[in-house]
């Protein structure tokens, strides 16, 4: 629970500030996997709310936990990507994350410059270590998606149907979903980077 509280409520606390017993109970790879699971659950829950779905409106379906593939991806990823560094205690999970991140940047459904602006803004809002700030540069205030990044971070319920419709009209439903996935992924990623504090 301490790890969950730290990721969601106060990501400025590093793993070093958590109960020292956490390291005695779990291996580094297990802490990494739990942190990624909690952070992505949090980010994608916010994404569903941003898309206009409230938790009480959604049905809960319990499915068995899938068994992750033990096969490594046959790809080479940038070793200077902060997520490459932070998720390294679990290499298979790290590679799958980086593959997902690459897929986001290959999408042509939403302007890459806007996605980079969203990512840069979330990096400003979450307390990531200075060593990683250069990888996520800030983009000027001229980008139209910055306000939605602020809304996603501070008050996800303030994202209106009118805003969603405007994005859909300009970029299609797929563009809206790509923007929301970007917000969810990096909200989660920067929480992990902030807490695991490498």
Image: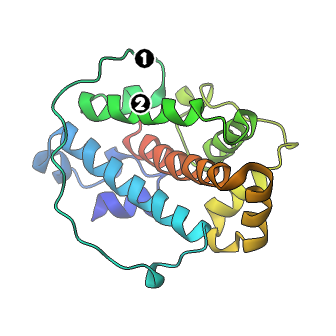
Q: Position of residue 12 (x, y in %)?
A: 49, 51
Total numbered circles: 2
Q: Is residue 19 above or below residue 134?
A: below
Q: Position of residue 2 (x, y in %)?
A: 29, 62
The circle drawn on residue 168 is: none
The circle drawn on residue 99 is: 2
Q: Which quadrant: the N terminus? A: bottom left
Observer-nearest of 96 and 138: 96
Locate residue 140 relative to residue 32 in the image: left or right. right
- Disc number lying in front (1 or 2): 2
Residue contact at pointers 1 and 2, CB within 8 angstroms: no
Q: Residue at x 64, y 74 (%)?
A: 157
- Secondary element at image label 2: helix
Residue 166 visible in the shown view: yes
Mark 1 vs mark 2, CA separation in Å: 13 Å
Q: Position of residue 42 (x, y in %)?
A: 44, 61
Q: Quadrant of residue 41?
A: bottom left
Q: Is residue 95 above or below residue 35?
A: above
Q: Residues within 10 Å of mark 2 (few under 14, many from 20)?
A: some
- Secondary element at image label 1: loop
Q: Which quadrant: the C terminus? A: top left
Q: Is residue 155 above or below residue 18?
A: below
Q: Residue furthest left?
A: 25
Q: Residue at x 30, y 28 (%)?
A: 88
Q: Residues within 10 Å of mark 1 (few under 14, many from 20)?
A: few
Q: Position of residue 5 (x, y in %)?
A: 37, 64
Observer-nearest of 26 and 174: 174
Q: Residue at x 67, y 41 (%)?
A: 109
Q: Is residue 68 above or below residue 102?
A: below
Residue tagged 1: 79
* Mark 1 or 2, nearer chain start: 1
Observer-nearest of 89 and 95: 95
């Amino acid at each position: 629970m301490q790890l969950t509280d730290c990721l969601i409520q106060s990501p400025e606390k590093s793993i070093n500030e958590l109960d020292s017993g956490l390291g005695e109970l779990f291996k580094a790879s297990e802490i990494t996997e739990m942190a990624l699971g909690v952070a992505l659950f949090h980010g994608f829950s916010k994404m569903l709310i941003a898309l206009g779905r409230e938790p009480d409106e959604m049905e809960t379906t319990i499915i068995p936990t899938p068994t992750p593939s033990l096969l490594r991806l046959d790809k080479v990823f940038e070793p200077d990507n902060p997520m490459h560094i932070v998720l390294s205690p679990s290499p298979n999970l790290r590679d799958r994350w980086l593959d997902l991140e690459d897929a986001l940047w290959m999408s042509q459904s939403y302007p890459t410059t806007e996605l980079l602006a969203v990512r840069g803004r979330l990096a400003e809002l979450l307390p990531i270590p200075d060593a990683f700030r250069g990888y996520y540069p800030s983009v000027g205030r001229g980008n139209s998606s910055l306000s939605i990044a602020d809304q996603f971070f501070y008050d996800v319920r303030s994202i209106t149907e009118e805003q969603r419709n405007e994005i859909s009209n300009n970029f299609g439903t797929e563009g809206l979903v790509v923007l929301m996935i970007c917000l969810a992924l990096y909200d989660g990623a920067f929480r992990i980077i902030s807490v695991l504090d490498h």
